[in-house]
Image (tube, rainbow, N blue to C red):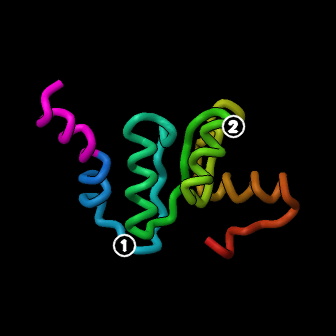
Amino acid sequence: MTRYRQTSVLTEAYKALLNANLRVGDWVVIPGAGGGLGHLAVQYALAMNYRVCCIDAGEDKRALLLGYGAHAFVDFSKESVSGNPVSRSAELKKERTGRSEAGDW
């Protein structure tokens, strides 16, 4: 892989977020958030002060992404991602903890 190609791959997630016309505090949903480009997109989105909902599978990826500071995580191998993933993530938190933190988001 050439140096140019490596740089191009690393900036794809950043360019996508810049071109999304989002504002500080807006939600961004990132499918495949624990993957190669997905985890970069999560970190860029957090640095841009967006609220981040990650979609991926597995407890290891949940821990990684929430450790980065992501606001929500939906495990597609266990939960449906149809509809609004942000709302579904809030429902899952309430089921697990008995309290909803949606107001804090």
* Residue 63 circle label: none
Q: Nearer the viewer, residue 90 or 59?
A: 59
In the rendered image, which quarter contains the N terminus? top left
Q: Is residue 26 rendered to the left or right of residue 76?
A: left
Mark 1 or mark 2, which is nearer the start of the sequence? 1
Q: What residue type is disc 1 on?
A: Arg
Q: Which residue is mark 1?
A: 23
* Percent position of residue 101, x then y: 72, 68
Q: Is residue 23 rendered to the left or right of residue 74?
A: left
Q: Dot 2, how many residues are within 10 Å of its Cα: few (below 14), some (14-19), or many (20+)? A: few
Q: Is residue 72 rendered to the left or right of residue 21?
A: right
* Percent position of residue 5, x then y: 16, 33
Q: Residue at x 46, y 35 (%)?
A: 35
Magenta run includes residue 85: no
* Residue 59 circle label: 2
* Percent position of residue 68, x then y: 54, 55
Q: Where on the picture, by quarter, is residue 21?
A: bottom left
Indicate which label's residue lies in the foreground, 2 or 1. Answer: 2
The segment highlighted magenta reads 1-12
- Judging from the image, what secondary structure is the residue with disc 1 in? loop
Q: Residue at x 14, y 34 (%)?
A: 3
